[in-house]
Structures are given as structure tokens and as C-alpha cells.
Amino acid sequence: MKRFLLLVFLLLNAFIFKASAQQYILSGHVTDQRGGPVSFVSVYIRNTTYGTTSNEQGVYKFNIGAGDYDVIYRYVGNKEQIDHITITDHDVLHNVQMEDEVFQLKTVKAVDKRNRDTAAYTIMRKVIAKREFYLNEVNSYSAAIYVKGMQKLTGAPKKLLTNGVSKVLDLDTNGHGILYQSESISNYNFQRPDKVKEITVSSREAGISPTFSYNKASDLQANFYENLFEVEGLSSHAFVSPIAKNAFKYYRYYLEGATVENGRTIDKIKLIGRNKGEYSFEGYIYILDGDWRIYSVDLQLTNKVNRLNFVDTMKVSQQYIPVQDNIWMPTSIQYNYNGNVFGFKFDGYYVGVYNNYKFNVAFPPDYFNGEVMRLDTNARIKNADYWFKNRPIPLTAQETRDYQKKDSIQRLQKSKPYLDSLQKSKNRVLVIPYTVFGFTMTSRNNKDSLYVYPFNQTLFYNTVEGVGLNLKARLSHTSNDFKTIGITPNIRYGFADNLLSANIHSYYYYDPFHEGHFFLDFGNDVLDLNNVGTRSVYFNTLSTLLSNNNYVKYYRSEFGDVGFMRELANGILFKGTLSYANRTQMFNNSYAHIFTSKTRHYTSNNPLAPDSVAANDRSVLFPQNQALTLNTSVKFTFDQQYITRPTGKVYLPSKYPTLTVNYRKAIPGVFGSDADYDFVSADISQDKIRLGVMGYSSFKLSTGDFLNKNKLYFMDYNHFLGNQGRTFDPTYVGSFHFLPFYQFSANSFYLEAHYQHNFAGSLLNNIGFMRNLKLEEIVGANYLTEKNNKDYREFYVGLQRFIFRVDYGVSYAGNKKYLQGIRIFYGIR
């Protein structure tokens, strides 16, 4: 009997617990006074950190337990509304009609001698004075964040909208349709001053990814209490917050009025950018009077004023709510954008919803270890039922149909006939892309691939080999645990010297989470005497045949090397290589050209021979020799941050300089090795140091010396990334504009320095007709000193737009002017 009563008692408790834990749906439709839907209204439960946002059609949805709730509805331009709702034992439909907000001036508007709205400026001074307090108010917190993104095509030119284009973009007959949808749910963790870790528990994407995306929780952390606001991908410079410490230099403020909501006075401040306003927002900021904190923002950036990339308008809306002990945090943020590219009109949005705030979280000491985001292994395999239960923003009917359609297409794409057809289509060789970029063939499961190097690197001409063929391909295989093995066979033949070269480069990428891989190379090849590279095969062929400038100098190497690389700890990367080579000098054998030049002639393949020496010169640069060389390096990336995906790590740029220490040892006497030297060097560099509205800087410093040079050959010198010819490659800050490829190569102590600054349009912005060109101004300087060539300097200015760049510079060698001229870059190296 006791056992029976105990069983009944347990069953009753289980029933009561289940009933109390039962979730119901609170949903409804939010409209304005005219009956139109109000999109993206913040809806949250009073005195909690649980909230949601209505969708584009004004529909909202909660999963909520039984109880009594005060539900708050907030949207910029409408009165805040609080409704008392009781949930019993069933779902509840609760529609809301929001009233327009009416802001009234508290006093007669007054202006000072500078024609400034004195009331607005008084308010903003108080807000700016409390900026740092609110910035540092919360030491740490965690939150659950839902992010949704969507992009639509709203118009397209009929001439370009062929059946093929419509099919690929999945458009209707009017050229309209959803191009892209994404959503994710993450646990976001923050600790002051800048420690972040985001755990993405679920993620979903459908359609063609847009040029820029903000589908991570960390992408939507817009904090206007910071002085600067950066919109990644839309501009090369930052924008000034309306409450930055120097905001009065960039904004004019106007008090539109005030209103009282639930006993709080809200001031509505209109913002207008000073001067041309490129670095400032337009719109409204709402201030909680007395507390002098942000209540909400409704701001925008426009291409006309702010010179944006890819879009015409970007709007930013953000709502703050009281969460705990008078602490206000964002409940939602939204980016709305639109644009027009070649007549294709589009608009879209990203919206973030913040829930379950927890403050002063005691994170473990090693919790913030550089991993800023981790995508769970199962994050991308959640089914439709999971998303229906867990997404806080309900889908519209159009979005639901789009997901269903793309899911059906995805299932079709996994069928054998489709995969066979797709594989045949994507492995088709297209002549023009192959010429510049090469082509790739992949297996059906994308685990095996073959990449054939482009034609412009296959057929070549130089004065040593004459016309030549360089046949090169890379084969790779990736296993189920994402380990990769690759092999690159290479056959090279020169018709003038009748010399066949063959070699194989291979690697085994065994640890994608720690950059761990082995590599093994062997064979023979024709190599550049400058081991950091000079001109590409393509540009050297052009300069040789068209203008008799045979810049690149070659030698023959029979080699074998084995190496290892791995991350020893976060931010510390080790690499070691042991190589053996038999090196032989080569000479010119071919003197073909397309245009005869009376002022230029081919030079010797000995880079140290005077230009006056005949092209068929046979002077000795170095005897045939052997070298056994140990090469080691350790790279230190301070405060290294990374994203962990199921396939491995993705490393992010550090905000601190990177230090690399190198040691190279030539070991004499082993396997007949002749070379005998020790070389050490150190590099410190950083790319894109943000300087707010003034763009960004990059720099590199390098120094090194030979500790001993008992036996040193020219290819063992320390070489530099010089440049000869009209084109150049500006993608690496450690390169020179005018430095000859070989003349300054060092066999003793050297010091190298590079600095470049991109003003991101902040200078040309002041010239009316230049604004629309969106050009970026660049200035820079390069410096090199070594024993035989002291104090080489370069200074340059340039203009850049996307991949196109033109520089003008001048160089000096010692006290004499060396070279000056124009250098251009158009994306091809």
C-alpha cells in the first residue's frame, strides 16, 4: 500500500510539473493608427530579459508559460504601450494598435550666437558627459542573441533578366524575389574591456550570400557609447557616434520635442552632420531625460553623403530597455539597407534580438582564450521543427515559401542525376577565366579536386630558356575529419636551352585546428635568384618581348626538402625546413623580341654585371655548389583571435603588431655541402591600423645580419621585394616601388622599413566633383640601408578604387635622386 501511494504521489508531482512547464504561444499583429503593419516592433516582458521583435508584416510570437504578464511594445515614432496579458492553459492571440508618438517642445525654442539650438546642446552635453559611465557600467554579461538576415531583389532590367538569370536567382516574372535568408542563435559572452566569445548553437542560410553580411551576433554589437562606429565592408573609415567626446565637431543638434512614457521623459534630438557630413549619421537619437542615457536611435548613412560601398542607404535602429537595477541594454538592433547595381535593385535587413541577459558573470580564468566564435558541429543540421519552436521572429508567408522552395531544391541537388549534371557543368573549362585564374575540377562530394594553373603562367618567354612551357597542377584530397593531402607536380621545358625540369611539391595537413602540416618537395627546377620573388612569369614575358627588359635572372636547382609547421600555442606558430640543393649558374640563350628598341638591350643573366655588358655574357656569379640548409621561424601574433568551425580555425587580424623571428643555418661538409653561414632576422608588422575617420595605416620593420658567412653564394643573400617596370603589386606593405631586384641584396647587416597610410577619401572629400569617384588617397615611404647601399629611400602618393591603383613616387640612393615615375596595379600579379 505504501508503495502504491508513493507511486501515485510521484505521478501527481510529475503531472503538476509538466503542467507548470507547459509552454503556450502568445502572438499577435501590431498595426499603427491607420491600420498598417508596424515592422520590427520590440516586444518584451516587463521586468525580465525576455523579448522578441515583430516581423516585416508586424506579426510577433512568444513561447511563454502560464501566468500574468505586462507586455511592452516599443517602436521609434510610436508611443510605448504596456498591456496586461494573462496566459492560462491555451495559446493567446493579442493584437495591438500603436499610437503615433507626439513630441512637444517643453520651452520656447532658443538659439545662441552660433545659431545653435541651446536646449538640444544642453541635453547633448549632459549625455556626452555620462558617455564613459554608461560605456563601463557593465563589467561582464552574457545573452542569447537571435540574428536574422534577408535580402530581396526589387527590380531588374528586362534586357539583363534572361531566363537563365531568373532561374539562378529564383525570381518571379517581374524580377522580384528573395535572394538570401539567414538566421542564427548564439550565446554571446562579453567581459570588459574587449573580451568576447560567441557560441553559435544553430545556423541556417539559404540562397546566394550577399557581398557583405552581418549574420553573427558579434556583427550586430552596435555600441554608440563608443566614440567611433565601424560598419565593416561599407567604408574604409569609421563614423563618429552622435555622443562621442568630440561629437560637437561633427554634428548639429536640434530638439524636436519631448514626450512622457510610463513616467519617463524622452527627448527627441535631430542630428545633422556638419560640413559635408561624411563621417556622421543623419536621423534621430532619443535620450532618457535626467538619466541622460540613450533610449533608442533611428539613424542612417547614405551613399550620397557618406560615400558607401555596395549600398545606397544603411539605416540603424536600436532599442534599449531597463534590464536590472537601472541597467539599460539593447533589446534589439536592426540594419536596413538598399542599393542598385547595374540596374538590379535590392533591399534587405539584419535584425538582432537579445534575450536572457546575465550580468557580472564569473567566467573561468581561461575562458577568453582568443576564440571569439565557435560554430557547434551540429549547428547547421537543425530541422524545420527546431526553427519553428526556437526562432523569436516568425517568418512571413513569403519567407516560409522561400525556405520550403530552397529546401526542395537542396534535396533535388543531392540526387544522383543532378550531382552528375552539376559536376559536368562546374568542371567545364572556360577559356577566358582559365587564361587568368586557371580552372578547378572537383569530385561530386567536393573531397577531391584538381586545380590547373592558368595559361598566363603556362606559356612563357625569357632570355635563358627562350619560349617555354610550365605545366603545373595541384591535386588534393580531404578526408571526413578534414585532414588534407595535396600534391603539385610540375614539368617545365625551355626550347632554347633544351632543358627539362620536373619536380613535386606535396603536403599533409593533419591538424586543421592548429595549422599542423608536413611538406615534402623534390626534383629540379629553374628558379629566380631573388628568393622572395620579382616579376611574375606573365609580366616578365611581356616586359621581355615588348620592351627588351629581361628583369628576372635565373639559376638551376636540383633539390629536396622536408618541413613541418604547427601552432605551438595560440598566437605562436613554428615552422622548420631542412633542404638540400645543388645550384648551377645559367646564361642567356635566346634574344627574341617583338619591337626593336634603339635605347634598350637585353642584359646579362648575371644580375651584378653592368648593363653595358653584352647579353651573351658568361661571367661567373657563383660556382656550382651544394647547400644543406636548416630554416626555422617562430611567428608571434599577440592577442590572436580566431573562429572555430567544424572544418578548422579561421584566424582574424590582430590589433597588435606581429613579430617573426627567423634563423637560417647552412651546414657545411654534410652530403658535400659547400655553404657555411648563419643568418638571423626579425620582422615586426601590422596591417590596417584603424585611425578613426582618417583611414588606416600599415607598416613593416625588418632587420637581420649574417653571424658568419664563411661560404655564402648569391642566392643565399637576404633579398628584398623590389620592383622594376610600370606595374607593381601593392597588396603587401613590405614591397618597394623602384628598388632593383638584385642590386641591393644584402650579405651583411640590413635595416628595412615601410609605412603606408590610406586616408580613405578624407582629403578628396573636400573637392566637390571628386566626391562621387570615391577615390582613396594613399601616401607612403620605404627605406633600406645595408653595407653596400646605404640610405635608399622612396616616397609616393597614390589613388585607389577597389583593385585599381595608380601611384607616383620618387626614390633616392644615398644623396642622389635615383628614379621617379608612375606605378599602376589593376588586380593581376
Image (tube, rainbow, N blue to C red):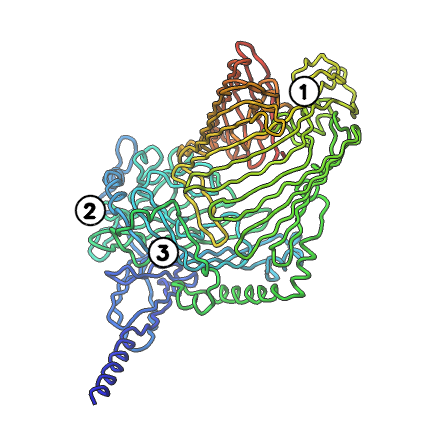
- Quarter of the picture holding the C terminus: top right
- The numbered mark, 3 or 1, whose residue comes first in the sequence reads 3
Mark 1 surroundings within 10 Å by alpha-carbon count, few (fewer than 14), some (14 through 19), many (20 or more): few
Residue 583, given in percent of the width and then of the height, sits at 66, 27
For the point 28% across and 63% down, the residue is 45
Disc 2 marks which amino acid?
Gly
Residue nearer the viewer, 260 or 91 = 91
Q: Residue placed farthest to the top in the image?
A: 815
- The numbered mark, 2 or 1, whose residue comes first in the sequence reads 2
Residue 791, given in percent of the width and then of the height, sits at 51, 14
Q: For residue 246, which quarter of the picture? A: top left
- Quarter of the picture holding the N terminus: bottom left
**Residue at numbered disc 1:** 623
Whole-angstrom CA distance, mark 3 to mark 2, is 33 Å
Disc 1 marks which amino acid?
Pro
For the point 63% across and 66% down, the residue is 415
- The numbered mark, 3 or 2, whose residue comes first in the sequence reads 3
**Residue at numbered disc 3:** 187
Task: Say left or right for 719 vs 285.
Answer: right
**Residue at numbered disc 2:** 290
Residue 623, given in percent of the width and then of the height, sits at 67, 20
